[in-house]
């Protein structure tokens, strides 16, 4: 993301430089209108860069996607500011206070929209993290069950490991704090089942059946908690 942000800064700097060149080479009276418009446009550019910096600081592509509205909203705000403040700079007949009021309104609405987008981004990101943590138990258990099938040595052991894998695979992926006790039991029982399969123990089948009962119990409670 840092490399991409450096490229973004390059484009941003070219746009700001272009604005400054046009602003000072085009014949125009440098009165209060000019400086008011110039200051607001410069503030819009700086604000846009600040928003882009926040977005590009994202740890991964998913987080950047959540933060992308910060870039788009600030960009639209900058374009609108260029138009309104540019007219204020170019048309001396416009009362300076009128230009300032309109520019302030644009700046305020853009800031509010960016703050709202930031709050939404943070909320969605937190929900995603919570969902990820709540589905971790079944995901890890499914991965362990998948690996365990390849370790089964006898036909009976293979059938049992497949049954365990299938019930885990189709279990409700979202956990709940109220299920912590039974999920702890499942973890312990699965470890015992895994050891029995690896050691080709006669207890593997009975442990597998007990494990299946526990998982079914967990899935039933999952439905009741929804």
Image (cartoon, rainbow, N blue to C red):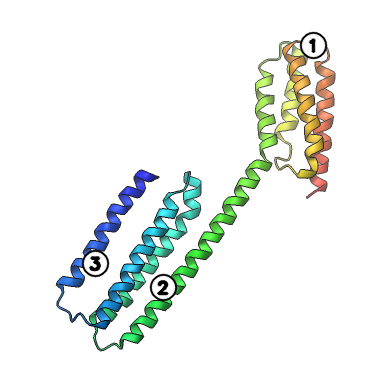
Q: Count the marks: how many? A: 3
The residue that label 1 is drawn on is 201
The disc placed on residue 107 is 2
- x and y percent of residue 218 in the render? 81, 37
Q: Nearer the viewer, mark 1 or mark 2?
A: 2
Q: Report whether 181 appears left or right of 130.
A: right
**Which residue does the image show at 54% across and 56% down from the upper left?**
121
Of the two numbered discs 1 and 2 on the same chain, state the one appearing first in sequence: 2
Separation of disc 2 and disc 3 at Cα? 18 Å
**Which residue does the image show at 80% across and 25% down from the upper left?**
189
The residue that label 3 is drawn on is 19
The disc placed on residue 164 is none
- Which one is in front, 155 or 15? 15
Q: Is residue 49 visible?
A: yes
**Which residue does the image show at 26% across and 61% down from the upper left?**
15
Of the two numbered discs 2 and 3 on the same chain, state the one appearing first in sequence: 3
Q: Is residue 82 visible?
A: no
- x and y percent of residue 167 in the render? 75, 31
Secondary structure under tag 2 reads helix
Above or below — where is 218 with respect to 99? above
Q: Report whether 114 appears left or right of 126.
A: left
Q: Report whether 62 appears left or right of 167.
A: left
Q: Residues within 10 Å of mark 3 (few under 14, many from 20)?
A: some
Point out the image quarter for the N terminus.
top left
Secondary structure under tag 1 reads loop
Separation of disc 1 and disc 3 at Cα? 78 Å
Above or below — where is 178 with respect to 120? above
Q: Residues within 10 Å of mark 1 (few under 14, many from 20)?
A: few
**Which residue does the image show at 75% across and 22% down from the upper left?**
191
């Amino acid at each position: 993301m840092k490399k991409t942000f450096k490229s973004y800064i390059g484009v941003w700097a070219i746009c700001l430089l272009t604005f400054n060149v046009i602003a000072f080479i085009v014949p125009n009276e440098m009165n209060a209108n000019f400086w008011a418009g110039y200051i607001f446009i410069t503030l819009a550019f700086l604000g846009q860069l600040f928003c882009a910096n926040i977005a590009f600081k994202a740890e991964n592509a998913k987080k950047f996607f959540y933060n992308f509205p910060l870039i788009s909203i600030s960009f639209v705000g900058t374009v609108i500011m260029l138009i309104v403040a540019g007219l204020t700079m170019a048309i001396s007949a416009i009362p300076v206070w009128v230009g300032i009021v309109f520019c302030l309104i644009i700046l305020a609405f853009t800031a509010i929209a960016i703050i709202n987008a930031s709050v939404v981004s943070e909320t969605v990101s937190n929900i995603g993290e919570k969902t990820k943590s709540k589905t971790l138990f079944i995901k890890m258990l499914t991965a362990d069950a998948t690996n365990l099938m390849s370790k089964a040595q006898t036909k009976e052991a293979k059938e049992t490991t497949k049954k365990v894998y299938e019930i885990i695979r189709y279990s409700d992926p979202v956990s709940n704090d109220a299920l912590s006790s039974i999920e702890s039991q499942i973890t312990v029982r699965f470890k015992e089942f895994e050891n029995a399969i690896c050691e080709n123990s006669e207890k593997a089948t009975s442990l597998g059946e007990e494990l299946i009962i526990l998982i079914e119990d967990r899935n039933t409670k999952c439905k009741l908690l929804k």
